[in-house]
Amino acid sequence: MYHEDKHFPRGGEFLPERWLKDEPESTGCPSAKNAHPFLFLPFGFGPRACIGLRMANLEMELLVARITRQFEYRWNYDELKLVSSLVNIPENELRFEMVEADE
C-alpha cells in the first residue's frame, strides 16, 4: 500500500524528505505532505499496536545515549545572553563543539 502511486506519487522511490512539512513543494511528494497523520503507521496504533514498538523506541534511546557518550561537549563562544520572558530564552542559537572523548 505504501508503494502505490495512488497514495504516494513516486512511491517506489526512497524519498525521506517527502515527510518534511517545511520543504518546498518541488521536493519529495506534495500529496504526502498533506496526507492524514494516521496514513503511515508502521507499528500500528492503539491497543492493537505492535508490542515491539516500545522495544524499538528503547533501542533508539540506547543508541543515542551510546553515541552521545563518545563525545565531550564544549561551549567555546562568547558569554551566553538571555532574553527574559516567562522563562529565560537564549538570544542566539546554542552552539556546542563536539570533541571525541578520551576513554
Image (spheres, helix red, strand yellow):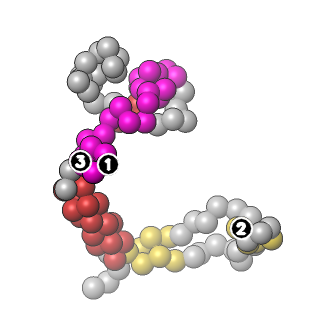
For this view, does 53 lie left or right of residue 101? left
Three-letter amino acid code at the position of disc 3: Arg
Please state the extent of the stretch shown in magenta in the rendering.
25-49
Label 3 element class: helix
Which residue was labeled with disc 3?
Answer: 48
Residue named by callout 2: 89
Magenta segment, prevailing SS (helix, strand or loop): loop
| Residue 31 place in picture, x, y as percent | 44, 21
Q: CA distance from mark 3 to mark 1?
A: 5 Å
Question: Residue at left 23%, top 47%?
Answer: 48
Specify the label residue 63 is tagged with. Answer: none
- In this orientation, which residue lies closer to the viewer: 21 or 102? 21
Query: Which residue type carries mark 2?
Result: Ile
Q: Quadrant of residue 72?
A: bottom left
Query: Which dot marks residue 46?
Result: 1
Which is nearer the N-term, disc 1 or disc 2? 1
Residue lying at the far bottom in this picture: please name it: 103
Q: Secondary structure at mark 2?
A: strand
Q: Determine whether label 3 and label 1 are within 8 Å by CB.
A: yes
Marks 2 and 1: in contact by CB < 8 Å?
no
Instruction: Mark 3 or mark 2: name the one nearer the start of the chain.
Output: 3
